[in-house]
Image (tube, rainbow, N blue to C red):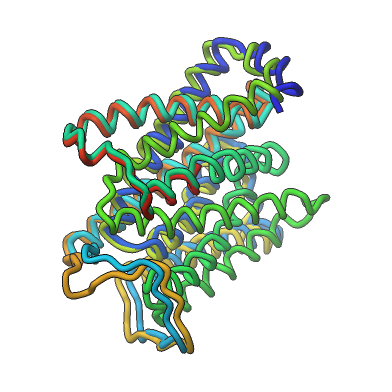
Amino acid sequence: MEYYRRKEMGSLSKGDVMKIFVQAILGFTVGLNVYGLGVKYTSATLGAAAFNCVPVTTFFFALISRMEKVNIRKASGMAKIGGLILCIAGVAVLAFYKGPYLKPLFKFHLFQTQQSHVSSKKEWILGCFLLFLTCLTWGLWYVLQAWVLRSCPSPLVLTFGQTFSSAIQSFFVAIAIERNPSEWKLAWNISLAAILYCGAFVIPVGNYLSSWVVKKKGPVFQAVTTPFNLIFTLIGSEFLLNDGIGLGSIIGAILLVLSLYSVLWGKKKEMNSIKPCFAALVCQITFAGMNLLSKAAFSFGMNTFIFFFYRQAVGTIFLLPLTIYFSRKDMASLSKGDMLKNFMQAILGFTFGLNIAYGLGIKYTSATMGAAAYNCVPVTTFFFALVSRMEKVNLKKASGIAKVGGSILCIAGVAVLAFYKGPHFNTLFKFHLFQTDHQQSHVSSKKEWILGCFLLFLTCLSWGLWFVLQAWVLRSCPSPLVVTFGQTFLSAIQSFFVAIAIERNPSQWKLAWNISLAAILYCV
C-alpha cells in the first residue's frame, strides 16, 4: 500500500501533520479512552448503542460548520431530522429501559472465570455519561475528518497518522493513570487477543474504510450506518457474553434502525454508488466486534487506559508499512497545520473519546449500552455539522423533518436503553463465549450506571465533533490512510501518558493469552 501512497506521504505539509495529530487526540486518544471506560461501566450493547448517537453529534457539528445542509421544506431534510430523532430515541430506550429478557434455547460457555465485573447502578450511570462524551467527541472528529481530508487526500495516510499520534498520546495518558508495572504486563489471554484484534483489524480496516466513506459521502453518511453496530453487538452480547436481550434493547434497536433508513432516505439523491454503503457496513461489523471483545477484556480485569494504549500501538505497527507503501507522497506533503489537526483529532476521537469516556462508560454499564450510545453519534455529528454549516435542514421539506425526527428518536432510544431494562426475554438458545461466575461478579451500582451513561454521552459528543472535524481535516489531507495512521500513532502516544499516569502497577501492563489480548488484536 505504501508504494501507491508514497508520494502522498511526501506531500504532507506541517499543517497536515498537525491536523492529523489533533484528530488523533480527538477521535482516538480522548474518544477511545472515554469510550473504554463507558463500556467497562455499562455493557458492550450500550456502548454500541451510544455509537448510534454519533451521527446526531456529527450532523450537529457538520451543520454548524456548514458541511451539511438541511432544508426542512423538502422531504430529504425532514427525513434527516426525523432519522436523528429516532436515533436518539432508540439509544435512550436502550440505555434506560431493558424490559423482559429473552431466554435462549441453549448456552455455550467457552471461557470460565471467577472474576467478572457486573456494573452497579452508579457505574452504569457513569458509563452512560462517558459514552455520551464519546459521542460528542466522535461527532466532532467526523466533521474535522472531512476538513483534514481536503488537504490530505489519502485515507491511508490519514489513518496511519492518526493511529500513530493516538498511540503516543494514549501512552502518556495510560502511564499517567496506571503506575503499577504489573498492569502493563500482557499475558496469553482474552485481553491480548482483544488488543491484537483491535490493532490488526479494526484500525487498518475499520478506520481506513471510515475515512474513505467520509471522503466519498461526507461525515454524516458514515455516521448514520452505526445502527448496524448495535444490532451485531446486541446479538453477540446475548450469545457470547451472556448479556441478556431485554425488551428495551429490542425497542431501542428498532428505533435506531428506523432512524438509519430515515436519514438514508433523506440523502438517497446523493447516492450514486453502492461501495460507500458496503464499506460503512464493514466498519460497523468491525466496531461491533470491538464492543464485545473490549467489554470481555474489561470484565476480566484489563485496565481500560492500558488496553487502548496497546490497541493504538499495535494499530500503528500494522498501519506503518501500509501507509509507507501506499501513501508515502501524502505523508511527505503534510503541513504543520495538518499535523496539528490530526493531533487534535487523535485527542478528541481516540484519546478522550475512546480511552477515557467510552472505556469507562462501557465498564460501568454494558457492551449493549455502549453500542446504543454510539447510535447517538449521528445526532451529535448532525448537530455539529449543522452548526458548522456542513449540513442543512429544511423543515419545510419531508427530508428535513425526517432528519430532525430521526435525531429525536435516536436520543429517545438511547435513553430507554440506559434507564429502563424491564423483564428479560428467554432466547431459544445461548452460545456464551465468555462465561463468568455471577456469584463473585461485581454488579454495577445505580451510581456507576449513571456515571457510565454520562461518560457514554460524552463519548457521543466527542465522536460527533470528531466526525465533523474529520471532514475538515480531509480537505487539506485527502488521504484517509495517512489521516488514520497519523491519528492512530498520535493517540497511541497520548494514551500511553494517560495510562501510565493512572495505572502505576506494572502487573496491569502485562498481557497474557486471554480475552484481553484477543480484544486488543481485534480492535487493531
Q: Is residue 92 above or below residue 221?
A: below
Residue 341 appears in the rendering: yes
Compared across the picture, whether 392 is left or right of 358 comes to right
Judge by depth and name the residue closer to the eye, 285 or 452: 285
State the residue in front, 199 or 209: 199
- Residue 147 appears left or right of 97: right
> Residue 385 placed where, x, y %?
55, 41
Write down the quadrant of residue 344 in the picture: top left
Residue 46 is situated, as x and y percent measured from the top left of the image, at 39, 63
Q: Which image quarter is the N terminus in?
A: top right
Q: Compare residues 472 and 195 and report the one nearer the observer.
A: 195
Task: State left or right for residue 497 relative to residue 245.
Answer: left
Instruction: Report the number of discs.
Output: 0
Q: Nearer the viewer, residue 232 or 320?
A: 320
**Residue beneath the point at 47% across and 55% down:** 51
Residue at image location 24% in from the left, 60% down from the top: 125
Q: Residue 67 appears in which quarter of the rendering?
A: top right
Residue 422's place in the image compared with 339, above or below, is below
Residue 63 in sight here: no
Name the outermost residue toward the right.
272
Residue at image coords 60%, 47%? 220
Q: Is residue 314 above or below residue 22?
A: below
Q: Is residue 477 above or below residue 449?
A: above
- Side of 225 where 496 appears, left or right: left
| Residue 230: image location, x then y, percent | 50, 64
Picture coordinates of residue 496 (x, y %)? 32, 29
Which residue lies at the image location 42% right of the left edge and 29% below the top edge?
167
